[in-house]
C-alpha cells in the first residue's frame, strides 16, 4: 500500500534544531506528577483565554492605516476565525497529566513501529485528557505534517496557543498550516506572534513575507524579506536566500545586494570562512595533547 503523500516544502521547515524551547510560563506545565497538584496557571480558565483573545483582536484591528479596507477587512476576518476556533474549548480543571503522559509514550512507541493511525489516536486522546500537556501536540504534529493533515493541526493548535500564548512551537506550526491552506490573514497573525517570541530567528520572516505577498501587501512583505535576509546565515538555506532576494528586487527594484559583484564577494567571504574553520580544526587535530 502506498504511503501518505510527501510534503513539498516551500518554506523553511518548522524549527527542529535540538529540543523544543519553552518560555518560563510554559516550562512548568510539561511534566507534573499529577494534575491535581498543578497551579491555576497550568490550566488557564476560559476567562483568561478570552482575555488573550481580546488582546489578539486589538492587534489584528489596530493599525496606523485604519481607513484602508484592504487592511481592516482581512484582519476582521482573522478575528472572526479565531473566535470560531475557540468557541468550544476543551474541558477545564479535569486534566489527567499522568494519563496524558502515558498515552503520549504509548503513541510514540506505536509511531516507531510504523502504526501511525493508532499512534495519532493515542495522541489525540492524550490531548483530550490534558489540553495543557504540550508534548502531546508536538508528537501529533510530527505525524500530521508528512500527510499534510492541516485540519487537525489547526483545530488543536488554534486552541492551545490561546491557552499558552508563549508556546512558540504552536504559533509557528499554526502559521505554517494556515499559509499552506491559503488562510494568509491568519498566517500573518501567527507569524507575528512567533516573531514576538523569537525575534532573532530568520524562518518566520520568510513565511510572513510569502503570506503578505499573497495579500498584495508589498511594503510589509518587503520589510519582512529584509528581516529574513538580515538574519539568515545558514549555508543550507541558500535556496531561500536566493528566492528572498529575487522577491525583494521585484518589490523594490534592483538592489546592490543582488548585483553579480556583491554575490561574488559574498561567495568568496563564505569560502574564506570555511577555510578558516578547516584550518582551526586541523590545528586542533595536530596539536600535542
Image (spheres, rainbow, N blue to C red):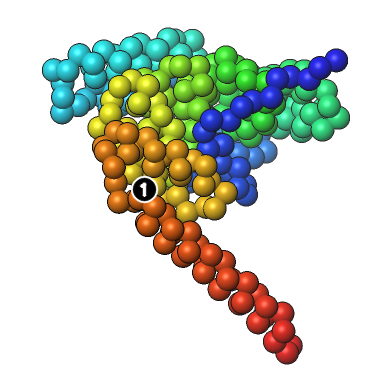
**Vertical side of 219 occupied by 74: above or below:** above
Image quarter where the C terminus lies is bottom right
Q: Hey, which quadrant is residue 276 in on the image?
A: bottom right
Q: Nearer the viewer, residue 6 or 161?
A: 6
Q: Residue at x 58, y 71 (%)?
A: 275
Q: Is there any visible trace of residue 44 in the rendered image?
A: no
Q: Nearer the viewer, residue 65 or 265?
A: 265
Image quarter where the N terminus lies is top right
Q: Nearer the viewer, residue 281 or 164?
A: 281
* Left or right: residue 222 compared with residue 158: left
Q: Nearer the viewer, residue 92 or 65?
A: 65
Q: Secondary structure at mark 1?
A: helix
Furthest toward the left, the residue is: 67
**Vertical side of 232 occupied by 13: above or below:** above
Q: Residue at x 56, y 41 (%)?
A: 15
**Vertical side of 233 occupied by 41: above or below:** above
What residue sits right under mark 1 in the picture?
Answer: 258
Q: Residue at x 46, y 13 (%)?
A: 85
Question: Where is residue 22 drawn, in percent x and y?
Answer: 52, 43
Q: Residue at x 45, y 43 (%)?
A: 242
Question: Where is residue 233 drawn, in percent x and y?
Answer: 47, 54
Q: Hey, which quadrant is residue 146 in on the image?
A: top right
Furthest toward the bottom, the residue is: 288
Q: Is there any visible trace of residue 15 in the rendered image?
A: yes
How many other residues sit within 10 Å of disc 1, few (<14), some (14-19) or many (≥20)?
Answer: some
Question: Where is residue 264 drawn, in percent x and y?
Answer: 44, 58
Amino acid at each position: 500500500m502506498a504511503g501518505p503523500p510527501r510534503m513539498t516544502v516551500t518554506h523553511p521547515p518548522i524549527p527542529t534544531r535540538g529540543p523544543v524551547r519553552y518560555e518560563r510560563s510554559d516550562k512548568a506545565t510539561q511534566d507534573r506528577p499529577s494534575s491535581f497538584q498543578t497551579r491555576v496557571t497550568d490550566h488557564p480558565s476560559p476567562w483568561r483565554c478570552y482575555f488573550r483573545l481580546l488582546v489578539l483582536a486589538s492587534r489584528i484591528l489596530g493599525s496606523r492605516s485604519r481607513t484602508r479596507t484592504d487592511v481592516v477587512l482581512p484582519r476582521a476576518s482573522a478575528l472572526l476565525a479565531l473566535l470560531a476556533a475557540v468557541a468550544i474549548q476543551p474541558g477545564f480543571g479535569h486534566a489527567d497529566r499522568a494519563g496524558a503522559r502515558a498515552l503520549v509514550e504509548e503513541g510514540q512507541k506505536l509511531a516507531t513501529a510504523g502504526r501511525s493511525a493508532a499512534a495519532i489516536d493515542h495522541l489525540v486522546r492524550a490531548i483530550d485528557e490534558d489540553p495543557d500537556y504540550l508534548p502531546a501536540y508536538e508528537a501529533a504534529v510530527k505525524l500530521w505534517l508528512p500527510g499534510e493533515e492541516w485540519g487537525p493541526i489547526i483545530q488543536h493548535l488554534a486552541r492551545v496557543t490561546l491557552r499558552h500564548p508563549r508556546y512558540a512551537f504552536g504559533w509557528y506550526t499554526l502559521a505554517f498550516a494556515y499559509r499552506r491552506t491559503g488562510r494568509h490573514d491568519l498566517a500573518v497573525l501567527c507569524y507575528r506572534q512567533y516573531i514576538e517570541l523569537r525575534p532573532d530567528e530568520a524562518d518566520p520572516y520568510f513565511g510572513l513575507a510569502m503570506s503578505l505577498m499573497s495579500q498584495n501587501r508589498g511594503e510589509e512583505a518587503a520589510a519582512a524579506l529584509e528581516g529574513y535576509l538580515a538574519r539568515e546565515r545558514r549555508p543550507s538555506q541558500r535556496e531561500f536566500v536566493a528566492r528572498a532576494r529575487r522577491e525583494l528586487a521585484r518589490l523594490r527594484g534592483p538592489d546592490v545586494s543582488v548585483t553579480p559583484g556583491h554575490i561574488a564577494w559574498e561567495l568568496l567571504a563564505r569560502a574564506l570562512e570555511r577555510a578558516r574553520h578547516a584550518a582551526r580544526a586541523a590545528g586542533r587535530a595536530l596539536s600535542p595533547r
